[in-house]
Image (cartoon, helix red, strand yellow):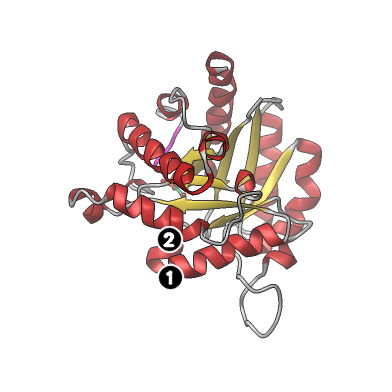
Amino acid sequence: MTKTLIVGNWKMNLNVHQASLYVHELSSEINHHDDVDVVLAPSFIALQTLSLQVKKHHLSLAAQNCYWRDDGAFTGEVSATQLRGLVNYVIIGHSERRHKFGETNKEIRAKVQAVLRNGLIPILCVGETADERANGETKHVLHDQVSGGLANVASDEIHKVVIAYEPVWAIGTGENALPKDVESAEETIRHQVESLYGHKAATGTKLLYGGSVNSDNASDYLALKGIDGFLVGGASLHVQQFSSIISKAHQLKGKKS
Ligand code: PEP
């Protein structure tokens, strides 16, 4: 059974104390479901504390980024090697990294490789900007970012990679994508994975949607056959909202499988 994957990206929010309190509240709010994996992506500073807290609540952790080298003179950076033992997942190429910090496909593919090399799971984020969408370039951008991000991934590693389709214009804006557009992007991404790694890899790749997901619209996306979960930003900061998304994922999982 493929589990639905729900990842909460807290971005640069919550201090260590608030993060710890959140985990306490979330775990008393949600039931553990075998068919849903819940992952929290706090700031680096909270990972150590939360790593001691999450296991008994069947939650996992993700880092929001990492550097592509394993160690060395890279002041201010955190490597995937240092994240081992703290997290299971690392978000790579989030649109805020691409567009606010100028990350390129070249860096992103090196980071994906570093995450895999260290036995962790990369969540590779891809998605078009509003201008690219208006210019009809969505497919082209997705091809570019998928093949660019996966360029160093061997065929025996592709099953470990999670891809998140996150249209940039839908992130943090409240303007979520239409399910039919998400479906079309999902097909484009799977098609690209298929052309690189074959049919089995394409159908087996876990694909998330992210972009203003909340408890009201979650079911619309979860009903889509090719969507395996969410990368949730703003709504994941609210325990009630996030737990409601998780229980919807569990309810819909039963209907989909
Ligand atoms: C995100 O940060 O990846 C995201 C999708 O944010 P939001 O849910 O707030 O749009």
* Image height of 243 relative to 175, above or below: above
**Image point 52% across, 56% down: which residue?**
150
Mark 2 residue element:
helix
Residue 185's quadrant in the figure? top left
Q: Is residue 213 magenta?
A: yes
Disc with the residue nearer the chain's start (2 vs 1): 2
**Image point 33% across, 42% down: which residue?**
174
Mark 2–mark 1 contact, CB under 8 Å? yes
* Image height of 21 relative to 228, above or below: below
The magenta stretch spans which residues?
210-214
Classified by dominant secondary structure, the portion drawn in magenta counts as loop
- x and y, in percent, of residue 22 in the image: 65, 44
Q: Pointer 2: what residue?
A: 96
* Image height of 151 relative to 35, above or below: below
Count of numbered circles in the view: 2
Q: CA distance from mark 2 to mark 1?
A: 7 Å
Q: Amino acid at mark 2?
A: Glu
Q: Which mark is residue 101?
A: 1
- x and y, in percent, of residue 127 in the image: 37, 50
